[in-house]
Image (spheres, rainbow, N blue to C red):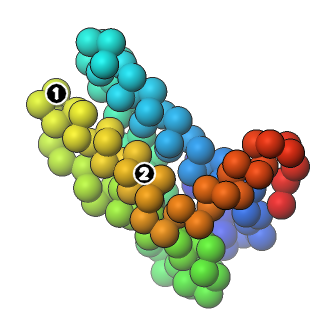
Amino acid sequence: MYLEFDKRQVFKYEIIENINFYISESSKGLKYISEKNNKEAMKTLKKLKKSLKNECNYYSNPNVYKFIKSNDINRIYFFGIKLAYSKLYKTYSYKYLYDNLFNIWDSISNNDMCLFLKDIKYLEKNMIKD
């Protein structure tokens, strides 16, 4: 689910869709924990970890990164993804399940990605794409 910054123009709404994915999935995982359904929460964490890893690996490629570093929006998105991935700790352990899901949610919904939040609310309200 990575964005192909090196192959085509990536629109802001596509970045927002990815941000929404991480926020909603990590929130879902946290809800599973509150419902005492740690098995589903762990499945959610594994799905998020795989997606974050794929994005980090793809965007870290020098041929891709050169397209990211030249654009502030792309760079903010990349560093938010990298931050979320770097905060994962012992993802196989149920002991750290809540912390890992919260850290993904926090890294994506905060960091400088909060610059996108007003756009997310606007797009949801008006259902238009940038």
Vertical order, 26 against 74 (above or below): above
Task: Write the residue at 12% across / 31% down.
Answer: 95
Q: Callout 1 environment at 10 Å: few (<14), some (14 to 19), or many (20+)? A: some
Q: Quadrant of the C terminus?
A: bottom right
Residue 78 x %, y %: 50, 68
Expressed as whole percent of the image width and height from the top left, the position of residue 26 reads 42, 36
For image coordinates 31% across by 48% down, the residue present is: 103
Query: What's the residue type where badge 2 is placed?
Result: Leu
Q: Mark 2: which secondary structure?
A: helix
Q: Is residue 6 above or below residue 97?
A: below
| Residue at numbered disc 2 | 52
Circle nearer the viewer, 1 or 2: 1
Q: Is residue 22 left or right of residue 5?
A: left
Residue 64 can be seen in this image = no
Residue 79 appears left or right of 129: left
Residue 125 locus on image (x, y percent):
80, 42
Residue positioned 47% across, 53% down in the render = 109
| Tag of residue 109 | none
**Residue that lies at the very extreme toward the top in this rendered image:** 36
Query: Front-most of 117 and 10?
Result: 117
Q: Quadrant of residue 64?
A: bottom right
- Compute the Cα span from label 1 to label 2: 19 Å
Q: What amino acid is labelled 1 in the image?
A: Tyr
In the rendered image, which quarter is residue 67 located in? bottom right
Q: Is residue 9 left or right of residue 50?
A: right
Q: Which residue is mark 1?
A: 94
Instruction: Label 1: state its secondary structure.
Output: helix
Q: Earlier in the sequence, mark 1 or mark 2?
A: 2
